[in-house]
Image (spheres, rainbow, N blue to C red):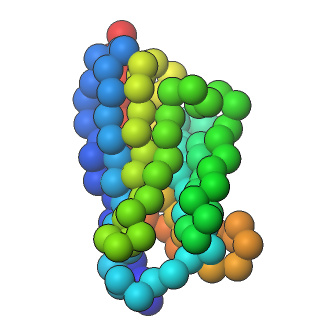
Amino acid sequence: QVQLVASGGGLVQAGGSLRLSCAASELTFRPNAMAWFRQAPGKEREFVARIRWSLGTTYYADSVKGRFTISRDNAKNTVYLQIHSLKPEDTAVYYCAAAIRAFEFDYWGQGTQVTVSS
């Protein structure tokens, strides 16, 4: 069973930047897509961004367009989330996920905490 390991979270001041990483434990793992979701305290988990593994095409939630960039390194089986201009409302646990079929995200990482101070 492939595992996804997320890292890169931390405490950042508003306006700062972070890069989150998520590595798949097996280099032979070839998902159809990978994505980032987040869950803020007291809120439901929400979609942030996704990327098609082979084509590299991306899709973002409206709330993060222009500030978040998802990318992947096929050789390292790693997906990244670059976040700029962080806002306090970006505070959440960020989860990476992988889909084998279409955008059915069946594989999940353990989450990495992002806290943005005002």
For this view, does 58 lie left or right of residue 71?
A: right
For this view, does 101 lie left or right of residue 49?
A: right
Image height of 75 relative to 58, above or below = below
Residue 75 at x, y = what percent?
Answer: 35, 73
Q: Residue 44: name its quadrant.
A: top right
Q: Is residue 44 visible?
A: no
Residue 60 at x, y = what percent?
Answer: 65, 41
The image quadrant where one finds the N terminus is: bottom left
- The residue positioned farthest toward the top in the image shown: 118
Q: Residue at x 36, y 10 (%)?
A: 118
Image height of 11 relative to 111, above or below = above
Residue 70 at x, y = what percent?
Answer: 50, 47
Residue 105 at x, y = what percent?
Answer: 63, 68
Image height of 7 relative to 102, above or below = above
Q: Residue 34: name its quadrant.
A: bottom right
Number of numbered labels in the structure image: 0
- The residue positioned farthest toward the front in the image shown: 55
Q: Is residue 25 visible?
A: yes
Q: Residue 73: name its quadrant.
A: bottom left
Question: Who is closer to the viewer here, 54 or 26?
Answer: 54
Question: Who is closer to the viewer here, 52 or 99?
Answer: 52
Q: Residue at x 35, y 83 (%)?
A: 27
Question: Who is closer to the viewer here, 90 or 32?
Answer: 32
Q: Residue at x 33, y 41 (%)?
A: 19
Question: Who is closer to the viewer here, 37 or 24?
Answer: 24
For this view, does 45 lie left or right of residue 62?
A: left
Q: Residue at x 53, y 43 (%)?
A: 39
